[in-house]
Every structure is written in structure tokens, then in C-alpha cells.
Image (cartoon, rainbow, N blue to C red):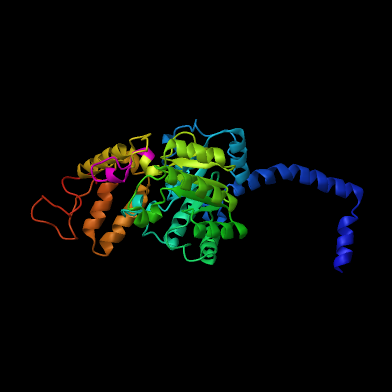
Amino acid sequence: MEHAALARVTHRQPAAHGQARAAAARTWPRLQTAFRHLSSWRLLSSAPETTTAVYGGGAKARPPQDHQPAAARRVTLATLRGKHRRGEPISMVTAYDYSSAVHVDSAGVDLILVGDSAAMVAHGHDNTLPISLDLMLQHCRAVVRGAPRPLVVGDLPFGSYESSPAQAVESAVRLMKEGGVDAVKMEGGTASRVSAAKAIVDAGIAVMGHVGLTPQAISVLGGFRAQGKTVDGALKVVEAALALQDAGCFAVVLECVPAPVAAAATAALQIPTIGIGAGPLCSGQVLVYHDLLGMFQSPDHSKVTPKFCKQFGDVGAVIGKALAEYREQVEARAFPDAEHTPYKISSADVDVFADALRNIGFDGAAAAAAAAAGKKEKIVGNGKPQDGDNINNGILSGSAGAAV
């Protein structure tokens, strides 16, 4: 039966076959457009339903994205290798949630690091050690939903890979499968860390190494201290980077090392180096989102901003000013105004609504609804008239036509 049906399909009349081909040719461009749209979503379950009835208020205020690259293709390891081969600098920024990921994506940055620095900038800890793998997974999923174009790297947090290569592989697999990232990053260049990196690579997962200042090792390092400042220290940085390359890492972060040491490591390696506080001669650079935007430039938070960070914006001051203005307008009942009260109910429905409220004994609520709709009606409180003509229901007060 199945063979017969297949025969009927494959041996159509030439005319019918030609019509089918023509229909397919007309349909295919539309399908291509649809597939391109769908492929931009890493997680299809996150695609929103139609929300124009409620949302869309920010569209008119959104400026054109002149900085967005014309061809917003997905960044892959092949993309990075090509840039490295051509000597083109690689850009990388941390992100920890959906909104920051959207901003980094729209800026055309090559890589996003979902860093364990979230422990400090997102959760208020003094170092990166407290954050867990489960919490990192939540950050990864949020970032992936907001950044369809950059290559997303998830940090393996402290305690998730040190015990054994098997534990490292298990944690890396979770970041890939549950977090949706494209690669993982791990700190350290000791023999045990190199073995763990190799095991992860052998499991089919791309790994970014990290040497120099490794914040997860502050207990051993004695705090956040620059590395490679002596001959022995400098050689250890280069040797660790080479060992991670041999283990199969696709790139290595060099953090808080002198520029000559970073330059030497970059020249010695055949894979990209990503510098942070390591001078201009690395293959690329990475900064923490909050640091470069100046979100923590205040006496209370400046302690978490490193010396090497250039502040490319003063977003913290803008946020503080906006929040203070919002509070002032709320207290003055200047917000929301008519423009920002967009949802309407017809005058006839207000009358029916008010009558229904009166029928169940809520005269004050009925008067409030009528007054908010601009109707001429006396305001009462809780269904009971107040003394004299000065009546107040706790929300509205004054003469007819009062508004909230």
C-alpha cells in the first residue's frame, strides 16, 4: 500500500508535476523569510504572543540603531577564527539578564560572557565565589533569549568543576543543555584545570580558558591582585595559556597582567587572547557591562569598579535622575497623565458599571468610577454620605468631575 502511494506521487503526470514545482517556487521565498525569522530565536518557546493590545509604548521613542552591523549573522567559532587570522580585534562584554543581552546584541559585540561576576554586580556579594551553577543557569537562559547573534559563553562557577574532569564535564553539559550557551569558560591553568578543560573539549564543548588574575582563586592569591609582575610570574602566565591551548581551548582570557606579558602570550599562542586589564595588544577585549556603563559610580558602589576600566557612559547618574523624577511626579500626582492612561471604557459601560456597583452597596466606588470618567457626579465614601458637603472616599475628593 505504501509503495503504491509512493509510486503515485513519484510518477505524476508531467503537467501536474510542473504545476507543483511552480507552486513550490512561489512558496519557497516566503518559507525562507519565515525560517530566517524563526532561526533568530534560540528558544522558540520564548517567542511572545501578540501583545500590541497592551505593549508597544516605547516604539515611538526608540532611536535608529545606526551602530548595528548591516549583516547581523550569528557569530560562531569560525567567525572568531577568521577575525583572529585577519588581525581584527574581537569585542566581548558581560551580560547577566535579558535586557543587558539585548543591548549588547544591538551594539554588534562579538561575544557575550555570562560571567560569574554576576555574584558581585547582580547579587551584591564582595567576590564571585557565592554564585551557584543553578543560578548561573538562570542568568544564561535569560541572556540567550535576548542575544540571538553573539556567541554566548557561560562561566563555570566556583565549585562546579574543581573536583574532577567528570564533574567539569557534567557542569559544562548543563550550561550547554539547560543554559543554551555556545561555549563555557573556566578559570586557572594548573594541571588539574588543564585536564578538566581537555575533558570538556573531548566531550564536544567549546572552552575558553582564563589565566592571570583568576577571581575564583582569591583565597590563594590573597585577594584581587595583578599577576605576572615578576619574571617567574610572567612565565607562568604564558605557560598556563599555552597549556590551555594544547588542551583545545578556542581562546584564553588574560586578566590583570602587565601589557608585555599579555603581548608575549598573544604572540606565543595560535588562538585569540581576550584581555581585561592586560593592555591593548591582546586579540580582543572584555569588560563588565556595569563597569563600562558607569552604573556603579557612587560612593556606595565605586569599590567594585576596577582601575583598568574605562567608563564609556554615566548610566548610573541617568538612572538615578530618572528614578528621582519619577518619584517626584508620583508624589505630585503629575504621573500618570492623560497620555499615559491609554486604556478606555465607553461612557455607556461606565454607567452600567456604576449602577452595578450601587446595586451592591458600593456608592463610593460608583462615584469614583464616574468621576474618573469625567462624569458630573457627587462623590461619596464607602456608600455612606459624609458630614456636610465636604465628602471624601479616601481616593477622590472635592467637587464634581474630580480625577485621579
Judge from the rendering whether residue 218 lies leftward or rightward of residue 363; answer left or right: right
- Quarter of the image for residue 354 reads bottom left
Picture layout, residue 315 above or below residue 346: above
- Magenta part of the protein: which range? 292-305
Kindly give the residue lying farthest to the top in the view shown: 66
Q: Nearer the viewer, residue 64 or 256?
A: 256
Q: The N terminus lies in which quarter of the figure?
A: bottom right
Kindly give the residue lying farthest to the front in the view shown: 231
Residue 292: give x, y in percent of width and height. Answer: 38, 38
Residue 239: give x, y in percent of width and height. Answer: 51, 48
Judge from the rendering whether residue 377 lies leftward or rightward of residue 230; answer left or right: left
- The answer to whether residue 162 of the structure is visible from this angle is yes
Judge from the rendering whether residue 6 lies leftward or rightward of residue 218; answer left or right: right
- The answer to whether residue 108 of the structure is visible from this angle is no
The residue drawn where x is 35% and y is 57% is 219
- Quarter of the image for residue 327 reads top left
Considering the whole magenta stretch, tell me its main secondary structure: loop
Residue 330: give x, y in percent of width and height. Answer: 24, 44
User: Residue 296 lies in magenta, yes or no?
Assistant: yes
Kindly give the residue lying farthest to the left in the view shown: 388
User: Residue 122 lies in magenta, yes or no?
Assistant: no
Picture layout, residue 362 above or below residue 280: below
Residue 344: give x, y in percent of width and height. Answer: 37, 47
The residue drawn where x is 37% and y is 35% is 310
Judge from the rendering whether residue 123 lies leftward or rightward of residue 60; answer left or right: left
The residue drawn where x is 17% and y is 54% is 394
Q: How many marks?
A: 0
Q: Nearer the viewer, residue 49 or 157?
A: 157
Q: Nearer the viewer, residue 65 or 386?
A: 65
Q: Nearer the viewer, residue 284 or 135?
A: 284
